[in-house]
Image: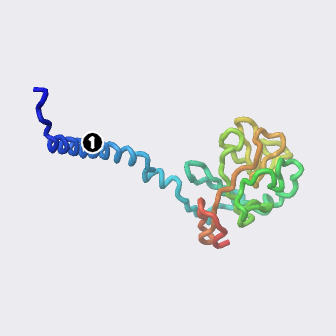
Amino acid sequence: MANQEVDQSKRKFLIAATSVAGGVAVAAVAVPFVTSMLPSERAKAAGAPVEADISKIEPGSMITVEWRGKPVWIVNRNKEMLDTLSKHDASLSDPKLEVVSQQPDYCNNAARAIKPNIMVLVGICTHLGCSPSPKLQTGADMGAEWPGGFFCPCHGSKFDLAGRVFKGSPAPINLVVPPHKYLSDSILLIGEDGKGAA
C-alpha cells in the first residue's frame, strides 16, 4: 500500500481543474464587488453641470438651484445693490479677495461675477456648513446699517451681496462662487468653467 504509484496525469488534471474553478469563483465574486464601487447613474448626475434659466429672476431677487447636492443662489442684483458693494470694504475681512481664493479667476473682481448684476454663490456658510438666510434688502430686521446680503442664523456669520464675509463673523472666508458660464443671455450653466456668452 505504501508503494502505490501516483498517477501524475490525474494529479495535474485535478490541480488544473481546481485552479480554473477557483479562478471562476474569484471572478464571480470580484465583478459585483468592483461594480459596486463605481458611481451610480444618480451619483454621476449629481455631479453633472446644471442649467438655470435666469430670464425670470426679477431685479433685486434670487432663485436657488441644486448642484452637487448643494444650494446655489443666483441673485439678480439691481443698481442699488451693486452700488452698496464698494461702500463697506472697511467692514469686510477680505474685500479684495486676497486671503483665500473662493471664486474662479474670471470672477476675481469687485462684483465677484461674470456679469455684474448676476451673482452666483454656493449657499453654504464657510464656518460650519449651515445655510445662511438671504437678507437682500438694506436695513429691515438686520439694523439700519445692514447693506443687504446673507445672514447665517446658526452662529451669526454675515456676508454682503457679493458673498464677502464681514469682520467679526465666525466664518473665516468668503462664500464660494462655483464654476459657471453663460450658454446664452438667459441660460447659466453651473459646474463648468468659462465666461461663455457674457
Q: Nearer the viewer, residue 148 or 188?
A: 188
Disc 1 crowd rating (10 Å Cα; few below 14, some 14-19, many 20+) is: few
What residue is at 85 percent from the left and 45 percent from the top?
144
Q: Position of residue 100 (x, y in %)?
A: 76, 51
At mark 1, the secondary structure is: helix
Q: Amino acid at mark 1?
A: Gly
What residue is at 79 percent from the left and 42 percent from the top?
142
Q: How is the image coloured?
A: rainbow
Question: For this view, does 189 lie left or right of residue 150?
Answer: left
Question: For this view, does 15 lie left or right of residue 66?
Answer: left
Q: Tell me how many marks there are.
A: 1
Residue 183 lies, with reference to residue 177, above or below; the image says below
Quadrant where the N terminus is found in the figure: top left
Q: Nearer the viewer, residue 42 or 63?
A: 42
Q: Position of residue 32 (x, y in %)?
A: 35, 45
Q: Position of residue 198 (x, y in %)?
A: 68, 71
Name the quadrant containing residue 120.
Answer: bottom right
Q: Nearer the viewer, residue 113 or 153?
A: 113
Residue 156 lies, with reference to residue 64, above or below; the image says above
From this viewpoint, which residue is outermost toward the top? 1
Residue at the spot of label 1: 22
Question: For this view, does 40 lie left or right of residue 74?
Answer: left
Q: Position of residue 139 (x, y in %)?
A: 81, 47
What residue is at 12 percent from the left and 30 percent from the top?
3
What residue is at 55 percent from the left and 59 percent from the top?
50
